[in-house]
Image (tube, rainbow, N blue to C red):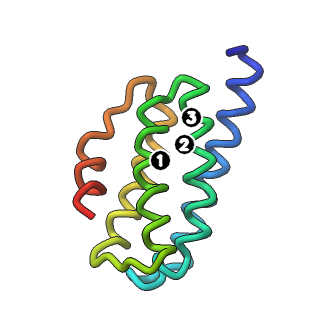
Amino acid sequence: MSDEFIAVASKEVNDDIESLENILKSCSDDNDVVKNSSLFQKHTHKIKGLAPMMGKESLGSFSSSLDDLFKKMIDGTHYDGIFAAISESVITMKKSMNEPEFNFSQISDKIKQF
């Protein structure tokens, strides 16, 4: 991919992560995360597509797991402890944008438990 594409994609992914962070700020518990799951899912869906194209395969894979989880919440599934897990996920996603080979294994294992 061209440097220009990577710069544009990086900005969009960072913007989407910031949007996830802002949605999360409006939440105070698991129920709020479930209520906002469709808003979260729009951003994770976009990230799962863009991240691999800019060389962030692990971010794309992790976002795909989150996307699937949010889809289940949209369909009515409720998860105890999801607020804390999503909070940690957003922080981790943000950190990953500044590290070339970020390891998502620890947070991925938490997400897979749901």
The residue that mark 3 highlights is: 51
Which amino acid type is marked by label 3?
Answer: Ala
Farthest residue, direction front: 75
Q: Measured along the vertical axis of the image, is residue 100 above or below residue 106?
A: above
Which amino acid type is marked by label 2?
Answer: Lys
Q: Assess disc 3: are there few (<14), some (14-19) or many (≥20) residues with their C-alpha within 10 Å of its C-alpha.
A: many
The residue that mark 2 highlights is: 48
* 32 relative position to 108: left or right: right
Query: How far apart, in angstroms, are the residues tagged by discs 1 and 3?
Result: 9 Å
Which is nearer the eye, 101 or 80?
Answer: 80
The image position of residue 102, as x and y in percent, is 37, 31
Residue contact at pointers 1 and 3, CB within 8 angstroms: yes
The residue that mark 1 highlights is: 63
**Any mark on residue 52, and which?**
none
Image quadrant in which you'd find residue 41: bottom right
Which amino acid type is marked by label 1?
Answer: Ser
Q: Assess disc 1: are there few (<14), some (14-19) or many (≥20) residues with their C-alpha within 10 Å of its C-alpha.
A: many
Image quadrant in which you'd find residue 36: bottom right
Q: Assess disc 2: are there few (<14), some (14-19) or many (≥20) residues with their C-alpha within 10 Å of its C-alpha.
A: many
The image position of residue 94, as x and y in percent, is 49, 46
